[in-house]
Image (cartoon, coloured by chain):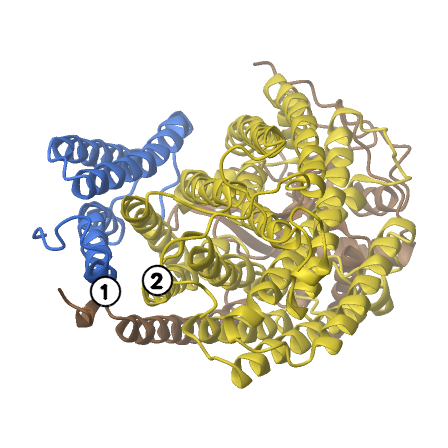
Chain colours: A brown, B blue, C yellow
Amino acid sequence: MQTTPLWWASDSFWRKMAIWITGGSFIVLIFLTFDTLSYITAGGKQVPGYAVINQRIDYRFDAGKNRYMPVIGPEEPLFGKVLGEAEAEALVAKGKLTTQAKNCMECHTLLGNGAYYAPDLTKAWLDPAWGSKEVREQTMVDFLMNPSDKLHNVVGRRMPRLGITEEEARATVAFLKWMSAIDTNGFPHNFKAMDQSDPVQAPPAAAEPVQPAPPADAVPAPAQQ
Amino acid sequence: MIEPVHLADFFTVFFSAAMVILFGALYALLFAFSRVGQRPGLMPLAYLSYLGLAAAALILARAANLHGPFWTPVVGLMLAGYLAAPHFIFRLCVDTHLVEDADESSLFPTRQGG
Amino acid sequence: MAALGIFDTANLNGGQRLAVKYFTVSLILFGAQILFGMLAGLQYLKPDFLYEVVDFSVNRTLHVNAMVVWLLYGFIGGVYWLLEDEAQHPVVGLWLGNLIFFILTLAVAVVVLVYLIIQVGPGEIESIWFINEGREYIEAPRWADIGIVVSVLVFFFNVAATFAKGRYTGVAGVLVADLLALFGLYLAGMFFTPNVSVDQFWWWWVIHLWVEATWEVLVGCIMAYMLIVTLGVRRKIVETWLYIEVALMFGSGILGLGHHYFWIGTPDYWLAIGGFFSALEPIPLVAMVVHAVFDSGVHKLRNSNHPALAWTIGQAAGNFFGAGVWGFMHTLPQINLYTHGTQWTPSHGHLAFFGAYSTAVIGFFYLAVQKSRGNVWMSGNIVGGWKWKWAMFWLWTGMIGMTVALLIAGYEQSQIERAMEGSTWMGYFAAQAHPWFTQAMNWRQISGWGFTLGYCLLVWDLLTIGKRETRPALAPQGEPATA
């Protein structure tokens, strides 16, 4: 009978293995972190600079990549005002701070992370429920400032009044517009973005059955199944 | 990079993924019981579980579109890894417990071959 | 030594007396987690309930934060519990440990009151410093973050210094290194950035690497001690297996971070990394199954504390189903594209957190109660032994009920909201209004009542078990923990 274990079953061997595997994985993670940060800093390959809020943002299927991609379109400034990169960053920062101070993430999800009591906000800027692109900005601001008297849905869930000021609401809209331009590897899939094409190019209406109305009176029909 | 699952395959994906893990556990469990209790009769059942695992993994690979130069090798590695893991771990159990068996009058033979 | 069956701190060493304080607060916060979870669940059924009084976001924040804190208190208690035994030396800075306990508990109480009463602040940096950081799981305002960092540092110092002065075992080595990682990783979550992708990138460092790496190892260390004490397994074997566990856990867990980096703006190579590690994820679980069977064959489960052992077995099963089966079902990116951010996540989250951690901490509670009552008998035929069994039954039945209900809701949501309706506002509510969803929410709430009943029985049992026992504990076979 043996009293010392075989080398490959000994505690000293596995202590070294634990240290090497942990250290090795961590070094790989650090390397990947540096690489990833180059993609996700604003203005990187997948996350746009803040001045992107001056442009039209769309979300369409890309056949080459086989997934949905944000598409940056012509100039379409937010609240009719073109902002420099620094001004845009300050506005988005204010909006992001507001989403944290109001704890949005504990009802909504952002990039799919958070709680699940309210809709995902990743592409909220592009949601057809805001009506048309002409009324969208103001509808969003009004909704954020005073949501509780507006009908949201058939399940009776309503967003509470969180004391959001007009300045905070506009900044939050800027944050949401900027977030919708992030390339999220195709999440959410199959998202049906609002029609943002200019009126002259728009096909005559009534070909499609009823576009959803703004959330103020949006009442989705209960699912048929 | 990925081909998203088709709506019709959702259930297949969830179910076969769960089966991969459950058959994997069953295989490990039967394998270990067979060796510990020296009941060779359980071993065919263990390998039958592995066959179940392999079938579930292949169904999963089909439904979740796990094909192409990256995902096909991942599936191959899953199949090989799950097959070898219980053997490897059991051997490790036996060998790490040699010290104990030395003074506990050996509950079962320490080396039975892999 | 006080009489058998009587609760007396004279039965405990200094570290263990401190541990009992941590365990007490931990158990109370477990109750708070259940309370706020039940309120949040009820709001799914009755959206006007407490609307604009205590909104869903407030209940949900308290629900998840109470969970993080009660488990952390349980782990800290567990470490103080074993510290003097393991180091063969009194805790070096016990007074400091006590002081920090009171400061930390006071801070937790203040944070809870601010969440409940002030709830939200203006969109200024001061809100993040004093009210709420607004990031799921780590909502604690910045002042409290700093407090947590200081507390963890003091805790680290107490543990490291006690081991350094006493016996520096293999368990000690893993524990000290792990606490250092626990401290370091928390710092990664303490900054503000307007960039939501960068924010969530580091946020996952804290959440994933805490929960799926350092916590696992912390529990592994405490379990290692429990195996030595309750089952009398030889130290050398336990320590070898602790190292094996660390190697497997960190080897799969650190880069397993990849499965959180699919959709937050990070490059698509994370789909490959996350998918690869998800596919290999079951291997540590297979190792656990084989080893557990092997050990039970060797030790025949003769043990001195039946409730603790039962919860430990429950831990293995819960970890297997929660992390293994429920994780693997929706973690490959090909399907996660649809399941991410639906009720799939809470279904997995509930079972995995309860299975891997709550069960372990409840096991420590039973060890603590046994020793506090003078190392009383806790094997077969415990006086009033029905209570621990029924507590366990209801906690598990409630948890499984909630998990299955959420699974059904998530399944429906991934199909209707995500795949068919394309994740819009309308799509979201179409899925929320579907009978599969609404009925699942009812069953979740009913199961929640079962879980609450289990909790009440657990508290009652922990307060009374061993009270009328006159038999001393069964001595474990093999090497005693205290040489």
Q: Residue at horizontal 63%, vertical 31%?
A: C384
Query: Where does residue C184 sit, x and y in percent of width and height?
Result: 58, 75
Instruction: Compare residues C475 and C106 and report the one nearer the observer.
Output: C475
Identify the element where label 1 is drawn. helix
Q: Quadrant of residue C201?
A: bottom right
Q: Is residue A218 above or below residue C290?
A: above
Query: Where does residue B55 sit, x and y in percent of width and height?
Result: 21, 32
Marker disc for residue C234: 2
Q: Chain of mark 1?
A: B
Q: Do the residues at pointers 1 and 2 share their chain? A: no
Q: Is residue A150 left or right of residue B65?
A: right
Residue A83 visible (yes or no) = no
Q: Quadrant of residue B89?
A: bottom left
Q: Residue at horizontal 64%, vertical 61%?
A: C77
Identify the element where label 2 is drawn. loop
Instruction: Compare residues A29 and C418 and report the one nearer the observer.
Output: A29
Report crowding for label 2: few under 14, some 14 to 19, many 20 or more residues within 10 A (C-alpha). some
Residue furthest left as drawn: B113
Q: Amino acid at mark 2?
A: Arg
Query: Where does residue C162 sit, x and y in percent of width and height?
Result: 58, 80
Instruction: Compare residues C335 and A208 and report the one nearer the observer.
Output: C335
Q: Chain of mark 2?
A: C
Q: Quadrant of the C terminus of chain A?
A: top right
Q: Is residue A204 above or below residue C99?
A: above
Marker disc for residue B99: 1
Residue furthest top as drawn: A224
Residue furthest bottom as drawn: C165
